[in-house]
Amino acid sequence: QQKLVESGGGLVQPGGSLNLSCAASSLHLDSFAIHWVRQAPGKEREGVSCISRTGGVTSYADSVKGRFTISKDRAKNTVYLTMNTLKPDDTGVYYCAAELKNYGCTNDLGAYEYWGQGTQVTVSS
């Protein structure tokens, strides 16, 4: 059973917006820092954003600061990534990943315990 399931990807024009969701099953997101990681065609995976276990700490890659917002809904056990002012360079598969960490987030993708299957985001006119 997939523990993390992403949704909300799609095709959008430059300047548009998308809202990605990462829904957890068999996991309590309050026990994990949750990351959004993307992989563009022909490139390695890169961290985009993270929200800590408590939700008190968030971080963003420089390339998305001011445009993307990460948030958590505890009642729905879901983490969201709201993406505004999208650019063609934002195109890629977006994954959510769970890191068992008591405080903050780390940038070590190898340390993340669980991954979703990914959702495709394409920004193109």
Image (tube, rainbow, N blue to C red):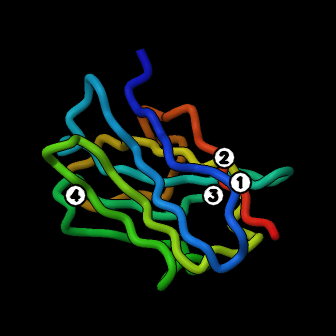
Q: CB of mark 3 within 8 Å of CB of mark 4?
A: no
The foreground one among 14 and 90 is 14
Q: CB of mark 2 within 8 Å of CB of mark 1?
A: yes
Q: Residues within 10 Å of mark 4 (few under 14, many from 20)?
A: some
Q: Amino acid at mark 4?
A: Tyr
Q: What residue is rendered at 29% in x and 45% in y?
A: 78
Q: Amino acid at mark 2?
A: Gln
Marks 3 and 4, the one that precedes in the sequence: 3
Q: Secondary structure at mark 3?
A: strand
Q: Amino acid at mark 1?
A: Gly
- For the residues labelled 2 and 4, the Cα–Cα distance comes to 29 Å
Q: CB of mark 1 within 8 Å of CB of mark 4?
A: no
User: Picture coordinates of residue 115 (x, y %)?
Assistant: 49, 34
Q: Residues within 10 Å of mark 3 (few under 14, many from 20)?
A: some
Q: Secondary structure at mark 1?
A: strand
- For the residues labelled 1 and 3, the Cα–Cα distance comes to 10 Å
Up-down relation of residue 110 to residue 36 (above or below): above
Residue at the disc numbered 2: 120
Residue at the disc numbered 1: 92
User: Picture coordinates of residue 93 (x, y %)?
Assistant: 66, 47
The foreground one among 9 and 40 is 9
- For the residues labelled 2 and 3, the Cα–Cα distance comes to 15 Å
In front: mark 2 or mark 3? Answer: 2
User: Picture coordinates of residue 46 (x, y %)?
Assistant: 63, 58
In this rendering, would 37 be left or right of 43? left
In front: mark 2 or mark 4? Answer: 2
Marks 2 and 4, the one that precedes in the sequence: 4
In this rendering, would 24 be left or right of 1? left
Residue at the disc numbered 3: 46
Q: Secondary structure at mark 2?
A: strand
User: Picture coordinates of residue 99 (x, y %)?
Assistant: 36, 43
Q: Secondary structure at mark 4?
A: loop
